Amino acid sequence: MTVPLYLADSTAREFTATVERSLDDRVVLDRTHFYPTGGGQPHDTGTIQVVGDSDAVAGDVEDDGWTFAVTDVEKTDTIYHYLDGSAPPEGTRVRGRLDWDRRYALMRYHTAQHLLSAVLLEEFDARTVGNQLYTDRARLDAEYPKFSKTDLADVEAAMNDLVDDGLPVRHYTLDRETAEAELDTERTRIDLLPDSITELRIVEIGDEDDPFDRTACAGTHVENTDEIDEVTVTGRTTQGGDKERVEFTLADM
């Protein structure tokens, strides 16, 4: 089973690992920093390069240094890394390198989405029911009849104030039973998670004693809200059933 290193450290740009399974154009690694698509956050891309002197390398791949592009990362029973060629054999030592510009953009947008969810809940009692992140924009669906232009302007101002405040972002794990007993389940959105998830990764933004946002989330995030930079709320659309979609962008870094 692949160890998801990205859960403990979102800042690592490269890592070493061993191929545990080789399946045509995809591999399973014993550990990875590549984030698989999930929770509204797209997968990472980058490269996997053959390194080291493992027995599996000799005679089976071209030579030490052979590099594959990682085109997709999916999590089902484990984490699969899709490559742009025939996968190296089991036992091969590799070095993974993330496309950091893509990852960092998604980290900024994911953290900003947390701020948007918290602002909408705090100011409008509008609960987040879905989101989708991209490297140049993001959208969030909330339970609310209709936001006005004034509402959106107020939301944008509130988000930018939180960015300017430079709030710390941190995470920790908590067993589900404790989380449901001790945390605000509406704010943390624990009820949206499958029952099979028994250990939760909690992400907090702000003061440790009284965080502005506290959410169960397995995504990647920046370490401080000042890394998000300027937020622009670009519009809204009604999704039906008293559900609104809010779209936003971030300033280019």
Image (cartoon, rainbow, N blue to C red):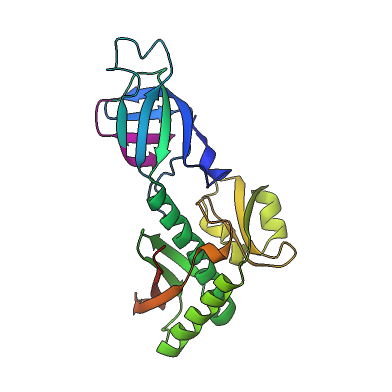
* Extreme residue in the right direction: 209
In reply to whether residue 112 is colored magenta, the answer given is no
Viewer-closest of 144 and 51: 51
The answer, for residue 38, to whether it is visible in the render is no
Locate residue 151 relative to residue 90 in the image: left or right.
Answer: right
In reply to whether residue 85 is colored magenta, the answer given is yes
Residue in view at x 52 percent, y 55 percent = 221
- Residue 161 location, x and y as percent? 56, 77
Above or below 144: residue 134: above
Above or below 248: residue 75: above
Magenta: main secondary structure = strand
The answer, for residue 212, to whether it is visible in the render is yes
Residue in view at x 52 percent, y 50 percent = 218
Viewer-closest of 81 and 54: 54
Residue in view at x 38 percent, y 45 percent = 99
- Residue 250 location, x and y as percent? 41, 68
* Extreme residue in the left direction: 85
Residue in view at x 44 percent, y 28 percent = 29
Locate residue 176 relative to residue 85 in the image: left or right.
Answer: right
Q: Which residues are magenta?
A: 70-86
- Residue 14 location, x and y as percent? 46, 37
Viewer-closest of 218 and 195: 218
- Residue 15 location, x and y as percent? 48, 33
Above or below 238: residue 129: above
Which quadrant does the C terminus fall into?
bottom left
Above or below 29: residue 210: below
